[in-house]
Amino acid sequence: MTIFRLAFCLLAFWVIDSNCQSEMVNIKGGSYIPLYGRDSLKVSISDFKMDIYPVTNQEFQEFVKKNPKWKRSQVKRIFADANYLQNWESDTELNENQQLNAPITNVSWFAAKAYCECQGKRLPTLDEWEYVAMADKKSIDARRNKNYNEFILGWYEKPKTFNNEIGSTFKNYWNIYDLHGLVWEWTLDFNSVLISGESRKDVDTDNNLFCGSAAIGSSDLMNYAAFMRYAIRGSLKAKYAMKNLGFRCAKNINENE
């Protein structure tokens, strides 16, 4: 891809171009203390790559067409529940109200994992996702930035739509879009830290996922925002498909790259 084409793709993300949408950036590894850690317990993150944008309706539509076992009518129920792609018009056609360049939702962890593997990628780990998502526009770690955390919690409280185009939120320090403010996202080990919830009934009504208003003004917004994410992940099962849950892919960085 030429420098001109890359620049055009990044500036004009609304143009439907799956190669552009799948562009990845390098993430420099480091360490951070997660919500479940202590001051002496830091998690180390190795260098890796992450998709700039969440996977879109168009990209997943193309994947399903090439991989019929992931069609709505053919997927095995152990891999996806009844909500899987329920917002589509048919097995391979989107609803007329769905935008091609909006993030795919109503997909299970199994389907998201299969998609990434088909691209020669993988889902990001929970710690990789949290590590990248703690950055705002200018800082690697903005978790103690009150305005940043109020923005995140404000979206948790009042999600208006899950059909906005990718790139409609801010670009963070790593040049990654849409980690906050568009959709929730699957991670490879989404339930490795169980905090809350043992069944689908805990998250059946999507409004139950968004109660950030109670934390606005809290002395530690950072921990509350993180707790919300961990609690929701702990309430999920791999076959669940929900209208506010999408994904993006990641990839290891090989030594010869």
Image (tube, rainbow, N blue to C red):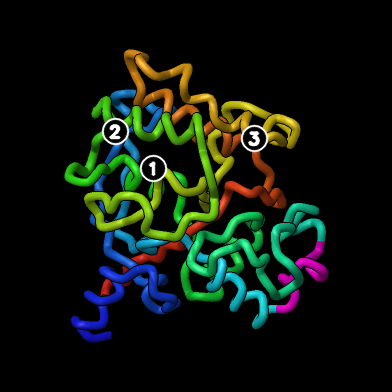
Amino acid type, residue under disc 3 in the picture = Ser
Point out the stretch of residues depicted in magenta: 68-76
Magenta stretch: residue 81 in it? no
Number of the label disc, if any, that sits on residue 148: 2
Query: Disc 1 marks which residue?
Result: 130
Q: Residue furthest bottom?
A: 2
Q: How many neighbours does mark 2 have within 10 angstroms: few (below 14), some (14-19), or many (20 or more)?
A: some
Q: Up-down: is 24 above or below 193? A: below
For the residues bearing labels 3 and 2, Cβ distance under 8 angstroms = no
Label ID, residue 235? 3
Q: Position of residue 54 (x, y in %)?
A: 45, 60
Q: Amino acid at mark 1?
A: Glu
Is 26 positioned to the left or the right of 244 in the image? Answer: left
Give the residue displayed 24% in from the left and 29% down from the top: 145
* Residue 20 figure quarter: bottom left
Image coordinates for residue 147, horizontal then vertical, percent:
27, 29
User: Residue 46, position in %: x, y?
Assistant: 31, 54
Q: In which quadrant will I find the N terminus?
A: bottom left
Judging depth in this view, the residue of 204 and 115 nearest the camera is: 204
Residue 63 circle label: none
Chain-order first, disc 1 or disc 3: 1
Q: Mark 1: give few (<14), some (14-19) or many (20+) Cα within 10 Å.
A: some
Per the model, the C-alpha gap separating discs 1 and 2 is 15 Å
Nearest-to-viewer mark from 1 and 2: 2
Could you say whether the residue bearing mark 3 is in a helix, strand or loop? loop
